[in-house]
Image: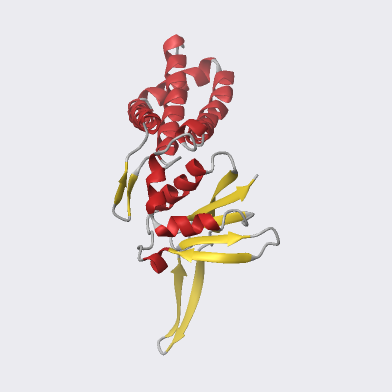
Amino acid sequence: MDMNFGNVLVLIIAIASAFMLMYGVFGKGAFATGGEIWGIKIEPTPEQKKFSNTCKTMMIIGIIGTATMIIPFFASAIRILFNAPIILMFFFPMWVGAFFVGALCAKKKGSSPELGENGNNALVLGDFDFIKVAESHIPEAKCFFIDGEGIAFVNAQDYCFAVERYEDYRLGSLTDGKQVALVGSYFEQKYKGMFDIKSQFERIPPTPGKVVTFVGGDGINFGYVEGTKYQANFEGFLFTKK
């Protein structure tokens, strides 16, 4: 079997496709790009819209590149295996790394000031009484947590001194993580650079499947209980004063 640059090019395209696919997927969910909350429609900023379109384009290119390169990839990998196996030894770590690098680059870009605190599209939420009361607690708060039910404030003594719930102000609870992100965007844009912001998740470890025994009138029977997958359920955003 002969190996030429075309075979190596296929591997390079596979690496680039992996990067673009993950960049697009993670970039689309890296920040709040606008939406509707409590009857208020929040449009994305020009920078957010541009980044969102870039992520969509890269995701589509990544999907197409990955799908179309499956057969050429295996053909090229076999040729390279017989002619220059050391290339494959370098390729696989680079290919796997492209997924991680793509996700990290997208998250870093999505959390940049130009896409977050430098915007002003979420400031319209400041007209709600709920937001005004919540802001009155910020001088005393060391940190506060925003979730689908409201906002909890904690002081320097680690005491939760106030909890403001949306329903107490005739506002509906938030069932969509993007809506929670919009509330967080208000505080990020209003108090530029004052807080470190982290997403909080409920992490549920996986459980293995197991065989169980049933004892009944017809004797002993055996069954199998399927295991559960790892879960990371979004809970909210933690704002901590710098």
Q: Eyeballing the image, is 182 above or below 158?
A: above
- Where is residue 33 shown, x and y percent of the image? 38, 40
Residue 76, position in %: x, y? 43, 20
Task: Judge whether 40 appears above or below 44 on screen.
Answer: below
Does the image show residue 12? yes
Residue 216 position (above or below residue 14): below
Q: How many marks?
A: 0
User: Does residue 236 appear to the left or right of 73 in the view shown?
Assistant: right
Q: Residue at x 46, y 61 (%)?
A: 150
- Compare residues 158 and 63 and report the one nearer the observer: 158
At 41% from the left edge and 44% from the top edge, which residue is drawn?
123
- Comparing 124 with 66, the one in front is 124
Q: In which quarter of the image is residue 159?
A: bottom right
Residue at the extreme bottom: 217
Residue in front for this viewpoint, 170 or 10:
170
Colouring method of the image = secondary structure
53 to the left or right of 135: left
Whether residue 231 appears in this view of the structure is: no
Q: In the image, 61: left or right of 26?
A: left
Quadrant hosting residue 56:
top left
Q: In which quarter of the image is the N terminus?
A: top left
Q: Name the image quarter holding the C terminus.
A: top right
At x 48%, y 41%, the residue is: 189
Whole-percent x and y of residue 190?
Answer: 49, 43
Q: Where is residue 94 in the image (x, y as percent from the top left)?
A: 55, 26
